[in-house]
Image (cartoon, rainbow, N blue to C red):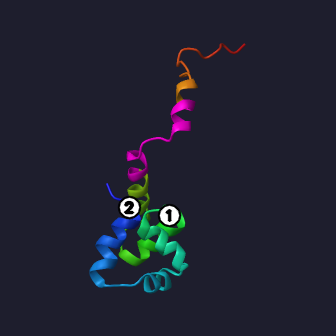
Amino acid sequence: MKHPGIFFYTVWVSPRGYSIERVAHELRVSRSVVAGLFAGTMNVDPDIAARLSKYTGKTRRYWLDLQVSYDLEQPPCDHLVMDLQRIHPIGMWEIPCQK
């Protein structure tokens, strides 16, 4: 799965020949924000999702779901793997009795 910013560039921007400057102007964000989206180094947050929604006609949830799906497909970083090994599941039946 592609990063949603790369997907946005590939599907909506590139076929129209739009520049980073044009997209930044139309989305009312900085050039660096759009460059980060196109490079896949900036995530789609609720603010960007709202702007992309207005620009493309897709919903905010569509753009946020693309980001979450992309994020979930990425391998966890080393420190998360180590932390997860140290977390023990809470047992559903281990709830202490309240008196």
Query: Left or right of 31: which side holds 11?
Result: left
Q: Is residue 90 magenta?
A: no
Q: What amino acid is found at the position of numbered circle 1 in the picture? A: Met
Q: Which mark is residue 14?
A: none
Name the residue: 36% across, 74% down: 57
Q: Residues at badges 2 and 1 in contact (C-beta under 8 Å)?
A: no
> Dividing the image into 4 quarters, which one contains the C terminus?
top right
Q: Say whether residue 87 is visible.
A: no
* Mark 2, secondary structure of its residue: helix
Whether residue 72 appears in magenta in the rendering, the answer is: yes
Query: Which quadrant of the structure image shows residue 55?
Result: bottom left
In front: label 2 or label 1: 1
Q: Residue furthest left?
A: 15
Residue on which the image places disc 1: 42
Mark 2 nearby-residue class (10 Å; few <14, some 14–19, many ≥20): few
- The residue under the point 49% across, 61% down is 43
The answer to whether residue 21 is seen in the rendering is yes
